Image: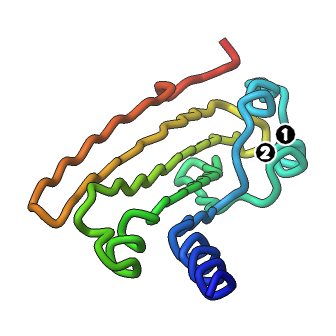
Amino acid sequence: MVRTVTIAIVSALFVVSGCVSGTSGSPELQADKVAQIKKGETTRAQIETMFGPADHVMMLADGRRSMMYMAIQHHGDMSGTIARSAIPFAALFPTTDTHTVRRQSLQIYLTADNVVQDYEFSDSTSERKTTASAFGAHSEESKVSSTPPADLSK
């Protein structure tokens, strides 16, 4: 009997852990690498050495190029939702789910000679917490923190 209860508790803990994470686009764009970009000096080859191939490259009408790097990391803790659906009577108690998303973008403008003319970098994180219970209580809390689009070479 003790063994059955132990197995049930351990199984429930695995189910309740409910974390989901992922990344899309480029890997994390590190601010210290962005700070190394120098207008009029850094070349496209150096940019690609620092960040890898761009997610998007566009040729502009005047012969310049625009390179775009985007990184999105997300993490979701769905343990509250999983607990409410998998564990008897768990829905009677308030549970909280958390979802965090970090978005980064780096847009670089290159001259026709493939030298950095200008760039913009932004980094923001948003977090949403949702609490719910079987008695109809529901609350949602959101917050966003960001570094404004920045030209770090100034």
Q: CA distance from mark 2 to mark 1?
A: 6 Å
Tell whether 138 sits left or right of 44. left
- Badge 1 is on which residue? 43
- Badge 2 is on which residue? 114
Determine the image quadrant of residue 10: bottom right
Name which residue lies at 80% across and 33% down.
33
Q: Nearer the viewer, residue 124 or 98?
A: 98
Q: Where does the image place residue 23, in percent across and percent down from the top left?
A: 63, 62
Q: Residues within 10 Å of mark 2 (few under 14, many from 20)?
A: some
Tell whether 48 sits left or right of 74. right
Query: Is any atom of residue 131 visible in this view?
Result: yes
Quarter of the image where the N terminus is located: bottom right
Q: Nearer the viewer, residue 96 or 117?
A: 96
Query: What secondary structure is marked by label 2?
Result: loop
Name which residue lies at 61% across and 53% down.
71
Please say which color scheme the image uses: rainbow
Name which residue lies at 33% across and 79% down.
88
The amino acid at mark 1 is: Thr
Q: Where does the image place residue 20, in percent across and percent down from the top left?
A: 56, 67
The amino acid at mark 2 is: Asn
Q: Are marks 2 and 1 in contact (CB under 8 Å)?
A: yes
Name which residue lies at 42% across and 42% down.
126
